Amino acid sequence: MKRREAIKNLAIFTGGAIMFSSGLLVGCNSSEVRIWLSDDDVLLLDEIGETIIPKTKECEGAKAAKIGTYMKLMADECLTKKERQIFLVGLTTIEDAAREKFSTDFMDLKPIQKKELFMEMQSQAEKEKKDSIEKSIAIIPIHYFQLFKDLTIHGYFTSEIGITEARRYEAVPGRYNGCIDYKKGDKAWATS
């Protein structure tokens, strides 16, 4: 291939790539409605996350990792329309369950009451999943509690606090060592 042909091909390729990518970017502008959550909703999501991953002596909890803001972003940008509906129904269901069981808002519950409420929701989610599997449903619908739990765990363990405090972290790993002794109670590696 001659230099002129290479330059011509490169110009055609880059021009096509630029036109193609701008077409893709226009296609990414979603016409779907976002969930515009209020600041109070974000605080509620922080409390939900803190109940799932509470603060301990060793490390901060999900609230310190700003899990509510993370869940809001994920709900707006990454969840499907169906998952967004489950997300919104889950928020109201948690509030309604708190009022029904303890006659107060979720935010006003004591940590032990929040845990009790979530244990019931976890049992309900597991039962619904088991029933779906037994009925051989091809696509098992996600339970709102499982959605909140998954978002909390992913958001926490990809946050700075989750990586550096809850797990062992080495910013620039040294040489490869395929056999590291494990002592009971050691944290998992964040860089694996």
Image (cartoon, helix red, strand yellow):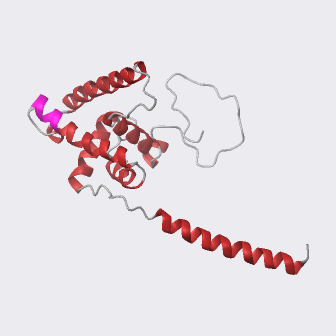
| x, y percent for residue 177 | 71, 34
With 3 as the anchor, is 123 left or right in this view? left
Above or below — where is 173 with respect to 187? below
With 16 as the anchor, is 149 left or right in this view? left
Give residue 139's quadrant in the image: top left
- Judge by depth and name the residue closer to the eye, 25 or 190: 25
| x, y percent for residue 12 | 73, 76
- The quadrant of the image that shows the C terminus is top right
Above or below — where is 156 with respect to 116? below
With 22 as the anchor, is 32 left or right in this view? left
With 39 as the anchor, is 137 left or right in this view? right
Residue that lies at the very extreme toward the bottom in this rendered image: 4
| x, y percent for residue 93 | 21, 37
In the rendered image, residue 46 lying in the magenta stretch gets the answer: no
Residue at horizontal 85 percent and vertical 77 percent from the top? 5
Give residue 119's quadrant in the image: top left
| x, y percent for residue 37 | 26, 55
Residue that lies at the very extreme toward the top in this rendered image: 134
- The quadrant of the image that shows the N terminus is bottom right
- Judge by depth and name the residue closer to the eye, 41 or 110: 41
Write the start and end of the magenta stretch as one range: 96-102
